[in-house]
Amino acid sequence: MSSHEEITIDTVLKNIKFQLDFKNEALIRSAYELAERAHLGQKRKSIIDAYIQHPLHTALNLAIIGLGAKTITAGLLHDVPEDTQVSLKEIEQKFGKEIASLVDGVTKLGKIKLRGTKEELYLENLRKMFLAMASDIRVVLIKLADRLHNMETLEYLPPEKQQRIALETMEVFAPIANRLGIGEIKGRLEDLSFQYLDPENYAYTEKLLHDQYGQRKKNIDRIVNELKKELLREGIDVVAIFGRTKHLYSLFQKLKRHDMDIEKIYDLIGIRIIVHDLANCYETLGIVHKKYRPLVGRIKDYISLPKPNGYQSIHTTIFGPGGDFLEVQIRTKKMDDEAEYGIASHWIYSEKKRKLKNFFMKSKHAVPEEELVWVNQLREWQSDIGKDDQEFMEGLRIDFFKNHIFAFTPRGDIIDLPEDATPIDFAYRVHSEVGNRATGAKANGKMITLDYKIKNGEVIEIITSRNHKNPSHDWIKFVRTSLAKGQIKKYLKKEGLL
Ligand code: MN
């Protein structure tokens, strides 16, 4: 999916991983026609490309990671309301509420601009992304596909913009792709950002990898051939076997941890073996070890103990015939798709949900509980949706933030609160003086009591008194956050009331 190539809607359709019925093909084609007409005459910064190439590439990225017709349709339309004469309302009339709300979600996410310190920016963006995700994860996936193409064509923008976008991609988008387990997009986003943020080290790492690969290519080809023969002889049906190199940015990070000593990086270049089922993975591991001596302590079984983001694979480092170390990764086709395309691949594999869940259950103690619950809930939720996103239920919310709610200030800032938090908790989170002077509150413009339980997504307005401070013992009884409790007690103590 080279980003500089001109593609057509047929390229997108060809890459869809579902059986596309007539209705859905018509849906996608009509979205394309609308987008093409709407963007007509517009150019991207690249000057050469007609604007339509951007939504087409976004849609192609979505098709490749396995998403369904509605998401691809929304991907084609994602810049229409923002940049053209065609309004969101028209999109809704033509394509329905669900697709319009996806497009709207992407437009809203696009309005988040970089501000504040690096950390603040990261958290703010992350929260907004999560909030969007809580209503529909497909919005985030479209945003990632959009960002990927923007990064791939970043060279056409002025240097200042390049830096801003690359930083944002590195700090916000790549971690989210990682969190969603979309290794392929994460790696590409990081490498593209790396190139702009640290061109010297990028060039250095690229050359290093290129040289190393050149030196070892012969060996790798030889091992691939030998293993192919051996596996065939042992009756293992190999789906694919190939040499692979690490992504540049992750290689550079690893080099920094190992005093820039390339000799210490064992997984620089490796071989991936993809087989049909789980039993084949372990059999293959045995065959690899029979043929090449494994490096002790380097066998990692992420199948029985998946990584926190759900990654599953067996890794082993072997002594190759040339005497170099080489990492071999063994996994099933399904695990490979999940590692590359993450959460998105669940649209394809949803029916095998139970099996996967059992894996997670068995290894529950092995990875941090919180992380696991997060991924598990995502997966669970994902598989409830069904095979394609057609069956997506309107208004469905992921509850992986079960214990969290997000509320907005009237200015649009996000306040993160525990479940059942009240306007008093909200007020103290904004500022201790807002808490101390609170006399009333509104949720979405309507008066609420001070012990009201705030709901996710509500805009909370605190009414304060200029002349009076009001904390009382009653407040302590209903507030949920220790911050509010502490502040109320502090005030009461100072006033001699506690
Ligand atoms: Mn876009």
Image (tube, rainbow, N blue to C red):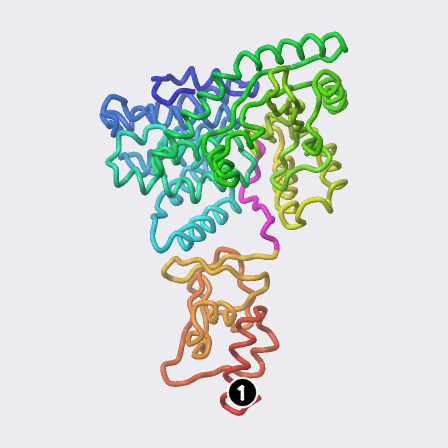
Q: Quadrant location of the C terminus?
A: bottom right
Residue on which disc 1 sits:
493
Between residues 357 and 16, which one lies in front from this camera angle? 357
Give the residue displayed 43% in from the left and 68% down from the top.
430
Q: Is residue 11 above or below residue 79?
A: above
Q: Is residue 159 left or right of residue 449?
A: left
Residue 444: name its quadrant: bottom left
Q: Main secondary structure of the magenta part?
A: loop
Q: Is residue 187 left or right of residue 373?
A: left
Looking at the rendered structure, the kind of residue marked 1 is: Lys
Give the residue displayed 59% in from the left and 69% down from the top.
480
Between residues 196 and 295, which one lies in front from this camera angle? 295
Give the residue displayed 59% in from the left and 22% down from the top.
324
Residue 496 in view, yes or no: yes
Residue 228 in the image, given as x and y percentages of width and height:
66, 10
Residue 177 in the image, given as x and y percentages of width and height:
50, 37
Residue 27 in the image, given as x and y percentages of width and height:
45, 24
Between residues 430 and 116, which one lies in front from this camera angle? 116
Residue stretch in magenta: 389-402
Asked if the magenta segment contains residue 301, the reply would be no
State the SS at label 1: helix
Between residues 74 and 268, which one lies in front from this camera angle? 268
Of the four image quadrants, the one with ligand 1 is: top left
Residue 420 in the image, given as x and y percentages of width and height:
59, 64
Q: Is residue 27 above or below residue 414?
A: above
Residue 95 in view, yes or no: no
Asked if the magenta segment contains residue 391, the reply would be yes
